[in-house]
Image: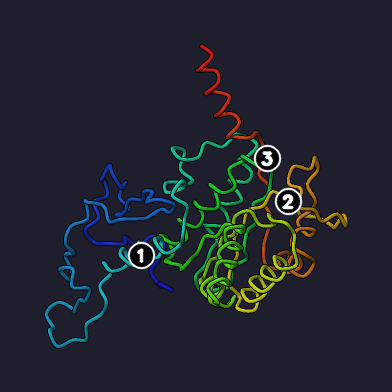
């Protein structure tokens, strides 16, 4: 993991006033199903190493060379591109231009801000689980957090939607691949972000996969971020795959007692309240069509 300060410029030639990247040195866009980052056109040739990637103390050509700071920009771009961020969320950030929360979501925004400002690369960090009804902006904020942790701290990360993970595993079985082939990379990254935690049919297979993934990351002391529609709280004894039930079961009934216990120990829970943002956008569209 990089030891660079979160506020160290990622490249000496970044133009602070660039209107395209706003001084970050990179831009992001959708590339099919996934988001990718690219160096901004404002970033010129490194003034320290000439883009060789190595620099020596001035005036001493025999001194031991060190890696140039300019490589940090390319490294973090590469790590973002390997994270598997959905293309729809290529530009999801916490900025007002990207995320316009209602008053009800401001408390959650404050929690997310405190989490990010308190993140330390030199210690084990608690995770954070964003929960609430659909359309509240959970996935948007999850991606915004992941993006910021990658580019500010240089972490390695992966984003997975739980049902897609299960589908990939089943495809791997058809190719005679073991569970570890897919899970190992998810265990090794610094940050794993699971979207739609608890979504599925509640089969024994799903319990086993989630238990192995969470347990291995728990034992390795690695951080988990997640979103879920299911609230924290005690079990009702009503585990169900019916996602349209009037009252959703608690998360413990969806992931099992063992996994939930470890989530309680290693993660904080943050509720997103307010209105369904997607429903509001759809209503505005209907209003325009009716005029």
Q: Is residue 248 above or below residue 124?
A: above
Q: Residue at x 42, y 66 (%)?
A: 154
- Residue picked out by circle 1: 78
Q: Is residue 243 above or below residue 44?
A: above
Identify the secondary structure beneath mark 2: loop
The answer to which of 80 and 111 lies nearer the viewer is 80
Q: Is residue 247 above or below residue 252?
A: above
Question: Which marked residue is nearer to the observer: mark 2 or mark 3?
Answer: 2
- Residue picked out by circle 2: 230
Q: Residues within 10 Å of mark 3 (few under 14, many from 20)?
A: many
Q: In the picture provided, is 76 more to the left or to the right than 216? A: left
Question: Which marked residue is nearer to the observer: mark 3 or mark 1?
Answer: 1
Q: Residue 270's spot in the image, x, y percent? A: 67, 51
**Number of dots carrying numbers:** 3
Q: Residue at x 42, y 46 (%)?
A: 91
- Residue picked out by circle 3: 273
- Quadrant assignment for the N terminus: bottom left
Q: Residue at x 41, y 61 (%)?
A: 80
């Amino acid at each position: 993991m990089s030891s660079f300060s979160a506020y160290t410029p990622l490249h000496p030639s970044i133009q602070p006033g660039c209107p395209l990247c706003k001084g970050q040195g990179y831009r992001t866009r959708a590339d099919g199903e996934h988001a990718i980052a690219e160096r901004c056109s404002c970033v010129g040739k490194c003034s320290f190493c000439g883009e060789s990637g190595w620099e020596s103390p001035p005036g001493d050509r025999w001194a031991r060379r060190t890696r140039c700071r300019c490589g940090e920009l390319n490294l973090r771009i590469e790590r973002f591109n390997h994270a598997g961020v959905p293309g729809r969320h290529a530009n999801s950030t916490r900025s007002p231009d990207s995320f316009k929360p209602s008053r009800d979501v401001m408390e959650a925004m404050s929690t997310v801000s405190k989490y990010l400002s308190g993140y330390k690369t030199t210690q084990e960090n608690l995770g954070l689980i964003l929960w609430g009804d659909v359309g509240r902006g959970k996935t948007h904020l999850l991606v915004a957090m992941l993006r910021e942790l990658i580019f500010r701290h240089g972490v390695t990360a992966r984003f997975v939607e739980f049902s897609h993970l299960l589908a990939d595993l089943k495809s791997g079985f058809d190719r005679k691949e073991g569970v570890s082939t897919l899970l190992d990379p998810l265990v090794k990254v610094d940050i794993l972000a699971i979207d739609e935690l608890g979504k599925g049919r509640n089969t024994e297979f799903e319990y086993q996969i989630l238990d192995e993934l969470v347990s291995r990351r728990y034992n390795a002391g690695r951080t988990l971020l997640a979103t879920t529609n299911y609230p924290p709280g005690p079990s009702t004894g009503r585990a169900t795959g019916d996602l349209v039930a009037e009252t959703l079961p608690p998360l413990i009934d969806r992931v099992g007692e063992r996994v939930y216990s470890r989530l309680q120990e290693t993660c904080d829970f943050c509720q997103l309240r307010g209105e369904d943002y997607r429903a509001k956008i759809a209503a505005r569209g209907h209003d325009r069509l009716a005029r």
